[in-house]
Image (cartoon, coloured by chain):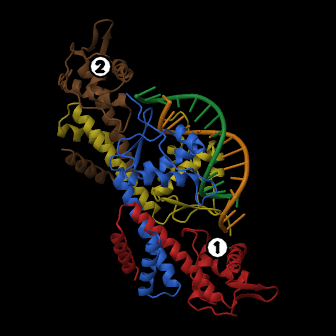
Chain colours: A yellow, B brown, C blue, D red, E green, F orange
Amino acid sequence: MPDDRKTFLMEPISAAAPGPLYQQIVDQLKCEISENRLKPGVPLPSFRALAEDLLVSVITVKRAYEELEREGIIYRRQGLGTFVSEHGHTRSCEAKLKSARELLREGFREAAEAGLKTSEILDLAREVLKENQ
Amino acid sequence: MPDDRKTFLMEPISAAAPGPLYQQIVDQLKCEISENRLKPGVPLPSFRALAEDLLVSVITVKRAYEELEREGIIYRRQGLGTFVSEHGHTRSCEAKLKSARELLREGFREAAEAGLKTSEILDLAREVLKENQ
Amino acid sequence: MPDDRKTFLMEPISAAAPGPLYQQIVDQLKCEISENRLKPGVPLPSFRALAEDLLVSVITVKRAYEELEREGIIYRRQGLGTFVSEHGHTRSCEAKLKSARELLREGFREAAEAGLKTSEILDLAREVLKENQ
Amino acid sequence: MPDDRKTFLMEPISAAAPGPLYQQIVDQLKCEISENRLKPGVPLPSFRALAEDLLVSVITVKRAYEELEREGIIYRRQGLGTFVSEHGHTRSCEAKLKSARELLREGFREAAEAGLKTSEILDLAREVLKENQ
DNA sequence: GTGGTCTAGACCACC
DNA sequence: GTGGTCTAGACCACA
């Protein structure tokens, strides 16, 4: 039973960044999974291993994993480890899409309140979209 | 003997709503100002009056006013009261526009991570924009 | 702003009982809410107050509250407290009904595996139901 | 060169399934015995053989057998192997029946707490029973 | 070794 | 005062 688990590449975590540390871990893992760098059945690093890697407490990692399990993206098994679930990729994409809609809705609302007309808002969207590429 | 007197139109504040109470006040006042229902030089209600109106603590209103003053949208004069500043409308619109860009940028990033192509993202944007109207 | 919060009647918690402590708290609160002893908008006791009451750690109570918020039964507001949400009663009942179906399904499966015919299983169900009253 | 040889019919074990691995083995063996596919005196596969079959550790199989022996369903003889005990079938059925009663009792309790009347609970039971067939 | 639970105590944001 | 986050360290169940 070889141990394929590896502390794969993960960007460092920063307490200075906005948002809780555990959320940063959640987001990064969602990215790994939604972009298929982490496939179903693949074991994630253990709490302790990832905690050491990221220089955070074991509990912070644990909390991130709990959040991901709650969303059905990973599953945890006592004594075995934590794994990407069968529909993890799908779930992760769905979650991101839902979040994207929320953000766009908010953004459009703010733009409208700033006095922009619908056509101007769409122009703004196109502009921002171009910048991002 | 109901007291229908109110300082000016303001929707009630709710502890059930997401986000801090003071932020809800800030947002509402920004709306009033960016949509020109509150014009430069017009006095805002006093801390105590608004606090009573909204059934929140004076401290909460104070914090909201401080936030707005920091953004240069209103100004306070000892003993006189609080007023919409000359460029309050402009500032408020600018702030909202800036926030809108941020949200759109975030939304587009999430959509991209969910696997959507640029053209699909623009479609999504159009769809959300339509829903909101 | 009177403080209606009270450390209402809550049965003691026991580490000897099966299942985690936080689950026992969750279950008790679900009962209070599903049976309308705790109505929407009513504040639950604070983490610290309930922890003292039940002689458990603040964190254990916190975890129970997190679970209930996740299920949409209560909501937490920083600085204000924790409250039964508008649809808390409904959600709580739905959750219990769902759980009941699961348990019955499991029970019937086991009974079938023990060799009982469908008619015998229904008799068993009637018998158990009578005992419980 | 696939190896189709197997000790006897047993569904594969899955780490993704809920519940410990050893419990899954226990449950499957109880089924085999309660449904008389494994009769008294019949030798069970050795620890090592079953472990290889199910791709789990020998220790995990050992623990499952211990659990079954504790319940009097199987017995072990030094140097000979493990066998279904004389009253294994009966014991297994009794255990399942006892467990079924527990589950039904729990299920009815939850249903009652969700606000269902006795007649409605019986309807629910009939409904679930039908679904399962 | 893995994850699961419980504990105690810190600091912060909000009211 | 409230809840929100992060920390460290204990003990247990499982493989």
In which chain is the residue bearing label 2? B
Residue A92 against residue C9 in the figure, above or below: below
Give the position of the C terminus of chain B as an image quadrant.
top left
In front here: C122 or A23?
C122
- The residue shown at (25%, 48%) is B128
Q: Can residue B116 be seen in this view?
A: no
Residue C78 location (% of width, % of height): 44, 35
- The residue shown at (20%, 37%) is A120
In which chain is the residue bearing label 1? D
Crowd rating for badge 2 (residues with CA inside 10 Å; few <14, some 14–19, many 20+): many
- The residue shown at (48%, 70%) is D105
Residue C98 against residue D39 in the figure, above or below: above
* Callout 1: SS: helix
Residue A106 location (% of width, % of height): 30, 40
Residue pointed to by mark 1: D22
Residue pointed to by mark 2: B73
Residue B99 against residue B127 in the figure, above or below: above
Which residue extends farthest top? B79
